[in-house]
Amino acid sequence: MAEILMEPRLSFVTLGVADVAASRNFYEALGFRASSASQPGVTFFEAGGVVLAVFGREALAEDAGVAVGKPGFSGVALAHNVQSKAHVDSVLAEAVAAGAKLLKPGKKAFWGGYSGYFADPDGHVWEVAYNPFMPLDEAGRVTLPAPTT
């Protein structure tokens, strides 16, 4: 069997956006801090061990060698987990105040937690969730149950 070179980790999440400066302002309003490595066409944010990047949509499509798609739901949602149900509601309100569109207010989820959704100004979907089955550690990272054997 060949050696697997890809490690099971995520390094960057890059969002294709219409206006990098406007997206930078939106994410900064939510508390993200832009890295000094940012440039006019791309902004990088520290996101708990992963980098969140906003990059011009057309430039990202060209870089990937794909056609530019329509903004909207692409089958992907980003998630921000928090410590309580009340925190879900507060973060959703904060996102809306920063310019997000509320997609679904916080409510009890079928899986036993509490969550809601917003879309950033480019339509990227974010879930804000309280999951009592996957608590957060001191650094705010999700603690998954042990792998199955």
Image (cartoon, grey):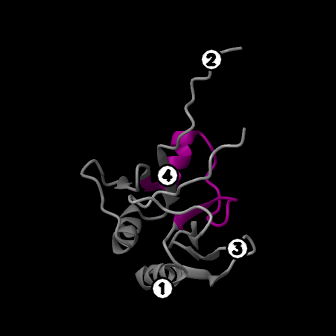
Q: Residues within 10 Å of mark 1 (few under 14, many from 20)?
A: some
Q: Amino acid at mark 2?
A: Glu
- In contact (CB < 8 Å): disc 1 and disc 3: no
Mark number displayed over residue 93: 1
Please tell me whether mark 1 or mark 4 is closer to you in this view. 1
In the depicted structure, whether residue 136 falls above or below residue 49: below
Task: Pinpoint residue 80: horizontal percent, then vertical percent.
Answer: 51, 66
**Counting residues from the N terminus, which is met first, the one under dot 2 or under dot 4?**
2
Q: Is residue 12 magenta?
A: no
- The disc, 2 or 3, on the residue closer to the chain's N-terminal end is 2
Q: Is residue 108 left or right of residue 98?
A: right
**Which residue appears farthest toward the top when viewing the image?**
1
| Helix, strand or loop at mark 2 | loop
Is the C terminus in the top left, top right, bottom left or bottom right quadrant? top right
Which residue bears the numbered disc 3?
112
Where residue 4 sits in the image (x, y, percent)? Answer: 62, 22
- The disc placed on residue 79 is none
Q: Nearer the viewer, residue 142 or 5?
A: 142
State the extent of the magenta-drawn residues as a range: 52-80
Q: Which label sits in the foreground, 1 or 3?
A: 3
Q: Residue 81 at what x, y percent from top left?
A: 52, 67
Q: Are marks 3 and 4 in contact (CB under 8 Å)?
A: no
Is residue 11 depicted above or below 82 in this figure? above
Q: Quadrant of residue 77?
A: bottom right
Q: Is label 3 or label 4 in front?
A: 3
Residue with the mark numbered 4 = 14
Gap in angstroms between the C-alphas marked 1 and 2: 47 Å
